[in-house]
Each structure stands twice: as C-alpha cells, then as structure tokens.
Image (cartoon, grey):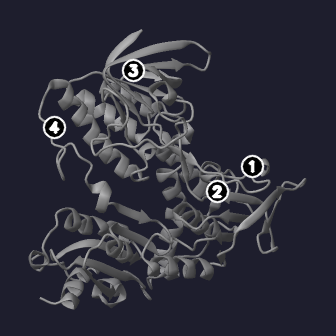
Amino acid sequence: MTTYDVVVIGAGPVGENLADRVVQGGLSAAIVERELVGGECSYWACMPTKALLRSGAALRAARQVPGAREAVTGELDVAAVLRRRDSFASDWQDDGQVSWLESAGIPLHRGHGRITAERVVEVTAADGTTTTLTARHAVVVATGSGALVPDIEGLRDAAPWTSRETVAAKEVPGRLAIIGGGVVASEMATAFSELGSSVTVLARDGVLHLAEPFAGERVAESLRDKGVSVRVGAEAGSVKRNTDGTVSLTLTDGEQVEADELLVAIGRTPNTGDIGLESVGLEPGAWLTVDDTMRVEGVEGGWLYAAGDVNRRVLLTHQGKYQARAAGDVIVARAKGEAVEDGRWGRHAATADERAVPQVVFTEPEISSVGLTAANAEAAGLRIRVIDYDLAATAGSQLQAEGYQGHARMVVDEDRKVIVGFTLVGPDVAEMLHAATIAVVGEVPLDRLWHAVPAFPTVSEVWLRLLEAYGR
C-alpha cells in the first residue's frame, strides 16, 4: 500500500493541473492513468483538431488579401496537413508528458483506477498486477468524458467514427457523413471538406444551436458554400456497414445517404462506468454533481472531488483546468486548516462556470463567445438590451481581408449596466475574445469601458462602435 496526500484518477490536462497545484501547495499527489498521459485534449481533441483546421484557415486568409492571393498557386497538401496533425498529437506518444510529471514531482501509476473504499484507489496495470493507493486527504476523479453513441438501429454494429477516430484518421474519406450539428460536427465538417471529402451533415437540431442564432446560420451558410450538404432537421433512423466497407444511412423520412465513413458527434458521456462509484454510494456511469469547490455531493466525509468534464459543469478543457486550479488550492487549504474562500469569485470557487465561460469554435467563420446568449440571459430573468454591429464596418476588418464578413453582439444587463454576454463571428476573432471575457468576469461598468480606447485601425474598434450604438 502506498500513501499520498491526494490521489488523482485521470492524467489529462485537468488531472495534471490539479496534481500540480496540490504539489505546489506543499502536499504530495499521485496520478493514475490508464491511457496516455495528457488525455483527450492532447491526442484526440483540442490540439490535433486545431492543427487539422489551421492549414485551411491560413490558406483562406492568404486568398482574401490581394498581393498574397496571387502568390497562392496550389491547394492544401493533405499529407502535410496530416503530418502536422500527427506532430501536435506527439505521434500519440506520451513521453514528453510523463517527463513533465517527473519534473513536477508527481508519481505516475499506470493502469485502471477504481475507488474501493473511503480514500482508497486500487490500480490494475496492463499485466493484471494491482497497487493500492491511499489518500490522506482527497481522491479526485478527473476521468473526463467519451463520445456518446446513441441507440440508432445498426449504429454500433457499423463501427462509426467518433471524434477520436476522425481526428486520428490516416486517410481522408471520399464521402463523410456526420450525425450532429454541434462544435465537433461543425469543425470536422469544415476540416474534412477542405481536405477533399464530400461531406453530409445531419443536424437534427440545427448547426451550433446553442450559440446565438446568427452564428450558426453563418457557419451553415459557409459550409454550404464549400459544397457541404447541411440537412437541418434530418435524423438517422438506421445505419448499416456494407460488405464493401461503405456506410448506408436511412433517414427517418426514408431518404438514403451513402458514405465511406460516418462520424457520430452528438454529445458526451462521463467516463465513470468502472471507477468504483458504487463503493461510495454513487451510480456507476453517472455524471458527478459537485459544489463550487468541486467536492462531490452525497459522499460522507467530503474527501471525494471531481473536476473537468466528469462533473458536467462545462465540457471545455480550459474550464476544466480552471476548476482544477480551484480544487487543488482548496484541497491544500482544507488539509492545512486554512481559510476557504468559496464565495462568489472567491479563490477556491469556480464561479466563472455559471455565467462567464469563454468558447471558440474554429469553423469558417470562427465563433468566439463568452457569457450568456440573449436567449439565456432572458431565461435567467435579466432585463437586457442587445446591441449588434457589423464587424465588416470597422477599418481594421477592411485591412484584414477583402470581402471581410463578420458580426458582433453585446448583451447588456440594464439594471447593472454591465456586459453579461458577448459573441463575435468572423475571421480570426478567437484572439479578440479575452477582452470580452475580462469585461464579463470583471463586471466592468459600461461607463468605464468608454475609457478603454481600442487602437486604430484594428478590428477591435468594434468595442467603440458597440458602445456608440448603446449610447452614453
């Protein structure tokens, strides 16, 4: 039996950050991982997906600027794009991540971790040997989530791609069908259409339906301009993998869709099915409900924490790492008997999860957003005013690209005169998001924002134009 102050199950970005905060705080921490150290984001999500998308975005940007446009003489080199993707996935080797753990003083236990009793985790290695780890203060579940495969007739037997297989694909299929219209579906439709696939998107609930309506509409229009068949409202009724390896989908209206590969991208499910939740009175396979310090509710003694996707608060890597920092610090504080700051915006509370979550969708056009949509703000009972502005009307956008198209929306809480939501749609708007995030998190009064003068000529001049539209 090996004892540490904290045992973390899951060595993705969330688990790594949490263990590091614990060690930086003066406690000992061990981490358990059954796959690759670095997790989903490093090998099958954030990094390799953006590598797939970046080459196409760079080519588009060059073609939108006279002078650069004339220098572009070819199309994307697919093999080069895939090689670059591989490099950002570290060729699916975790040596570098393991070295970082060692340098940070965090022991790694490879194998499948299961909670067997209070503060006890049993690790089963690939060769069947077991190691028992005991935590003095806390066990943290940071096992993330996996792709949800729905109960559609024949779907599982057809061995569809999930986000993992799509991101790691060695070849680009001639025809790719996608079930779903969310972030993964939209980004992969963008990437693979630019890499040469004929793509069909079955978006039952619409394209990016959780974003501001204009954002999803612009992405759907852009996909159609690329030749993607976007079927809003379409739903697969059954799926069959044919003897020649192709896939046949029968839609609920009877229409047939043929493809070489099928991506299912309709949501996520928690990786909690076999981690021993039943030993502490929780349901295996369920999402874990936590308080704002990431402590799991319903577990006596308050020793179990859950951070990242597994608690379903926000399924984004950067937000999971934010939770990890708060949880790591509060575990240290509680262990040392120090004061816990778990009030709104306190050091040990993940307050931003509620109304200040930033997100970028790397489609064409890009979508950057933080806080509430207008619909969500109204549903929350806020008295709001919505200000819209055409990004193309700024001088900076005209310099950025010929034919620049974009849109900005500011959602203002009229009672407090602060911004509660901000959405940007257009080329390269990802790098403009943090200013909006600071405004929302800092609850900066609009009167003070008038003194934050945007540089000219930049696309960020949209801040001034939105304030002018709102009025002093």
Residue nearer the viewer, 359 or 97:
359
The label on residue 458 is none
The residue under label 3 is: 118
Tag nearer the camera, 4 or 3: 3
How many angstroms separate mark 3 from mark 1 (CA)? 36 Å
Q: Is residue 116 left or right of residue 388?
A: right
Q: Which residue is mark 1?
A: 156
Q: Amino acid at mark 3?
A: Glu
Residue sitting at the far top: 1
Q: Are marks 1 and 2 in contact (CB under 8 Å)?
A: no
**Position of residue 124 measured from the top left corner of the image (x, y, whole percent):** 55, 19
Q: Which amino acid is tagged 4?
A: Val
Mark 4 crowd level (few <14, some 14–19, many ≥20, 10 Å Cα): some
User: Residue 168: horizontal and vertical position, in percent?
Assistant: 62, 49
* Residue behind mark 4: 340
Q: Amino acid at mark 2?
A: Ala
Are the residues flagged by discs 1 and 4 in contact, CB closer than 8 Å? Answer: no
Q: Nearer the viewer, mark 1 or mark 4?
A: 4
Tell me the residue at 36%/88% (across/down): 392
Label 1: how many Cα within 10 Å (few below 14, some 14–19, many 20+) = some
Spatial CA span between label 4 and label 2: 52 Å
Type of amino acid under label 1: Arg
Residue 317 position (above or below residue 371): above
